[in-house]
Structure formats: C-alpha cells, structure tokens
Amino acid sequence: MAHLEQWSLRGEYFEYVAEAGPKSFLNGIVTDHPTQVDGTHVDTSRVIEFNKVTALTKSGTLYTLGKLDAQYADWLAEHVRAA
C-alpha cells in the first residue's frame, strides 16, 4: 500500500484545507507506490475517502498517512478550532 509522509490536504487552488472536499488532493512524500519512486514529492489525484489515517484517491490508490507536513500542522492549529 502506498504511504505518504509530510503530507497536507490541499484544495482546488493548492491552498491548505482542513477537510476533504470534492476537489481536494493530498501532497506529500510517497513510498511504496506502484508507479512512483520512493521519496518522490507528489500531488495525488482527487481524494474520495479520507479519515486522517488512510485516504483513497480517484485513481484507486489507497494511501496510509504518516506525519503531517510541519507547515500544514501549524496552519491547522491556527485555522481549525478543536471540536
């Protein structure tokens, strides 16, 4: 299964977003992907299922999600209120 480290969730215009939406995608460093070289920084296809542990993209790739990107984590801390 493909794995993303230092990932962030992005929207249609590459901006950070807090939740997966109809035009969101993941950005991060991939390993164990069937067509990408380990360590490559990638933008995924559109996210269709997302639960902060795994994500399924429109292309059919299922990703496990590792550590957040540090800048994205800071952005989340500033923009998302705790539930």
Image (tube, rainbow, N blue to C red):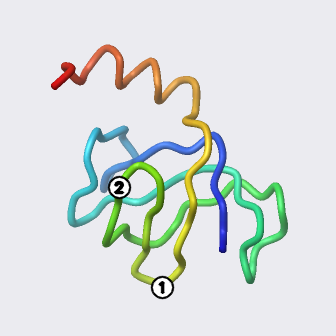
Instruction: Say what amino acid the circle numbered 2 marks.
Output: Asn
Q: Is residue 72 left or right of residue 34?
A: left
> Would you identify the image quadrant in which residue 78 lies?
top left
Of discs 1 and 2, which sits in the foreground? 2
Name the residue tied to disc 2. Answer: 51
Question: Residue shown at 54%/52% (left/top)?
Answer: 27
Q: Relative to 83, does residue 56 appear above or below in the rendering?
A: below
All told, the count of numbered labels is 2
Q: Quadrant of the C terminus?
A: top left
Could you say whether the residue bearing mark 1 is in a helix, strand or loop? loop
Residue 39 position within the rendered picture, expressed as x and y whole percent measured from the top left: 82, 55
Q: CA distance from mark 1 to mark 2?
A: 16 Å
Residue 66 position within the rendered picture, expressed as x and y whole percent measured from the top left: 61, 46
Name the residue tied to disc 1. Answer: 60
| Mark earlier in primary sequence (1, 2) | 2
Could you say whether the residue bearing mark 2 is in a helix, strand or loop? loop
Question: Residue shown at 47%/25% (left/top)?
Answer: 73
